[in-house]
Amino acid sequence: MPEITRHTLPARRGKAIAVNAGQSIRIINTHGTQVVDFWAYVAGHMSEFIGVEQSRATWTRLYPKTGDGLYSNRRRAIMTLTEDTSPGRHDTVMAPCDNERYGLLGCNEYHDNCKDNHHAGLLGLGLTVPFTPGSINLFMNIPWDDEGNLEFAPALSNPGDYVTIRAEVDCIAVMSACPQDILKINSQKPVEAHYEILPA
């Protein structure tokens, strides 16, 4: 069996990678504190991608659990969450951060953000899309109460926790090591994460 290589997802940056049908991507929260925004597109058909709204409607809950399919905007499972060693809290409510979001938080200069990381990652593969889908925000802890109030809280994951996501069709997976350093979601200290591609 070939040796599995671990790759770095640099702090505050994005990366896109091809994941063929049957292969899996393992995303590792190396330090336990880092949110990783995650998207996936059907390779060769960039108009079909994981839809968080469609996924929530199928799961009938706010976050995926082991064994759940990640459903596309065309209502088919294009990936499956097969392993999760974390406490399992992954946000699907919050939009990926963008420069305008940081402006609302009082930042007066350009701020690294997941929207731009998403597009930079795709561009690294020579791909572009004219939109930014909602992301599955891996390890992001957004508690809610009975009144419907939401909180930006530190991740519950431990160092080395990971999720493994299997591609059911040829996919382009995109990751962003979230640069959020104003709210508490990354313990206000964005750091690198790691990922591995596992054979079919």
Image: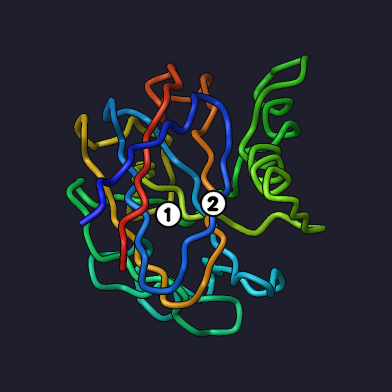
Q: Nearer the viewer, residue 151 or 7?
A: 7
Residue 81 vertical position relative to residue 29 in the rendered view, above or below: below
Quarter of the image with the N terminus in it = bottom left
Q: Nearer the viewer, residue 97 or 195?
A: 195
Residue found at x 47% / y 76%: 78
Residue 126 vertical position relative to residue 155 in the rendered view, above or below: below
- Name which quarter of the figure residue 117 lies in: top right
Residue 120 vertical position relative to residue 185 in the rendered view, above or below: below
Residue found at x 21% / y 34%: 160
Which is more foreground, mark 2 or mark 1?
Answer: 2
Please tell me whether mark 2 sits on a helix, a strand or a loop. Answer: strand
Q: Residue 94 vs residue 61: left or right?
A: right
Q: Residue 21 vs residue 116: left or right?
A: left
Residue found at x 71% / y 72%: 47
Q: Which mark is residue 148?
A: 1
Residue occupied by mark 2: 17
Residue 24, image x and y in percent?
A: 35, 61
Residue found at x 23% / y 66%: 66
First along the sequence among labels 2 and 1? 2
Amino acid identity at mark 1 = Gly
Residue 70, image x and y in percent?
A: 42, 71
